[in-house]
Amino acid sequence: MSIRQALLSLLANQPMYGYQLRSEFEARTGATWPLNVGQVYTTLTRLERDGLVERAGGDDDGHAVYRVTDAGHAEVQAWFATPVDRQTPPRDELAIKLAIAVTVPGVDVRGVIQAQRTDTVRALQEYVRLKSRGTDEDLAWLLVLDSLVFQAEAEVRWLDHCESRLARHRPPPVPAAAPAPVTDESVVR
Amino acid sequence: MSIRQALLSLLANQPMYGYQLRSEFEARTGATWPLNVGQVYTTLTRLERDGLVERAGGDDDGHAVYRVTDAGHAEVQAWFATPVDRQTPPRDELAIKLAIAVTVPGVDVRGVIQAQRTDTVRALQEYVRLKSRGTDEDLAWLLVLDSLVFQAEAEVRWLDHCESRLARHRPPPVPAAAPAPVTDESVVR
DNA sequence: CGACACATGTAACACGTTACATGATTTG
DNA sequence: CAAATCATGTAACGTGTTACATGTGTCG
């Protein structure tokens, strides 16, 4: 639903053709969320099917320009007026993964946490690096990067939190001492 | 892809039937991400189609029990061993919305931010309230809630950050003084 | 008995995603 | 001229999601 609304909103600002829409989208979100051009066209087709956009017959340069209809404008307005639903947040794959990892035997939970932490920190550094590239002109792009940074930082903190929680709840195995019981080779084997 | 992997991992721990799978999933993620039972069955069908699970013919009580195949075990192992990709994070609807809001004229960006902040804080309080309900038994459920709390907190901080960024970059309109220019009624009208 | 939870499944659709085909235009 | 970019589109598929049909068992 994100792309659909995004493209519609961009069109609401100014009629455009497909290729242009992709440029405008990526100018705002940068390389973070690359957008396959094909998707722009499929999305435009579906928006037209739903009566939210229509083709602006007269083109300046033979391009397939689309314009937002009245219903489309209403939808854009509603999108901006309504907050993103946080009562039912989108499923977080990492949270699900850890929730399952801690409840089934035979999974190296600490390994999962560590691997994720390393990867997230790497991504975080990449975001900071990209941020240093942006000028004040790219306000939108910078804000998106800030969002990613904030999210990644929260994720790292959460991972650390999980680890300490885990250490308290279920002390880590001592590698040198008595060998772990062989009872559970079920899941990962 | 989240649900698919989650159900597969739960099955890897122990063969189960559909209804049971849903219970196990919701026992770990709580009411946050409710799972329609129908989805369990469609997912199971697809997992079977891909050769990751198979029906365990003999049932204890006439239930349609599924069991993970060798290929399925490999997939589960790979899932736990591979960190969630943070190089290409999932699209964040809120970030996209704000990125567009700040770049098209006629959108009340501060209104969008405020509305979102209120809603996110409300969700945050709800998470905290739910957390007080959980016992030490529900380790997974508590960790999921913590994740949501950390994410929501980061979101609130980011929203505040956006607002101050915006104030510096583009001073807020003074309501009492000279009426705003009528040039742009384009987008929202 | 009636309502409700348990249990299984199917059909239809939405959005997102990629691979492919095709042509015009620009540029080294 | 060859390669790259611009530009438009289609076909096919994947997961997620819901609405519906259907039947069994249980409990007040």
Image (cartoon, coloured by chain):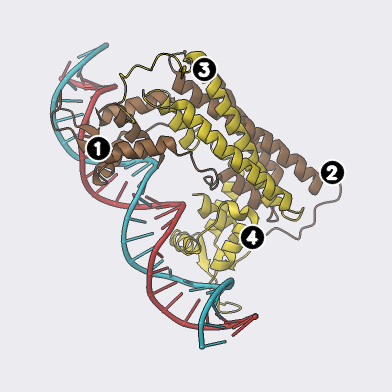
Chain colours: A brown, B yellow, C cyan, D red
Which label number is shown at residue A69? Answer: 1
Dots 3 and 1 on the same chain: no
Q: Chain of mark 1?
A: A
Q: Chain of mark 2?
A: A
The residue at which mark 3 appears reads as: B167
Q: Report how far apart the C-alphas of labels 1 and 2 lie in the structure.
A: 70 Å
* Amino acid type at image mark 1: Thr
Relative to B182, does residue B94 appear above or below in the rendering? below
Element under disc 1: loop
The residue at which mark 4 appears reads as: B13
* Amino acid type at image mark 3: Ala
* Amino acid type at image mark 2: Ala
Q: Report how far apart the C-alphas of labels 1 and 4 lie in the structure.
A: 52 Å
Q: Report how far apart the C-alphas of labels 3 and 2 lie in the structure.
A: 58 Å
Question: Residue at (83%, 45%) from the top-left corner?
Answer: A174
Give percent across and percent down for residue C8.
49, 72
Residue A38 visible somewhere in the drawing: no
Marks 2,4: beta carbons within 8 A? no
Mark 1 and mark 2 lie on one chain; the one further toward the N terminus is 1
* Amino acid type at image mark 4: Asn
Give percent across and percent down for residue A34.
40, 31
Dots 1 and 2 on the same chain: yes
The residue at which mark 2 appears reads as: A176
Q: Report how far apart the C-alphas of labels 3 and 1 lie in the structure.
A: 33 Å
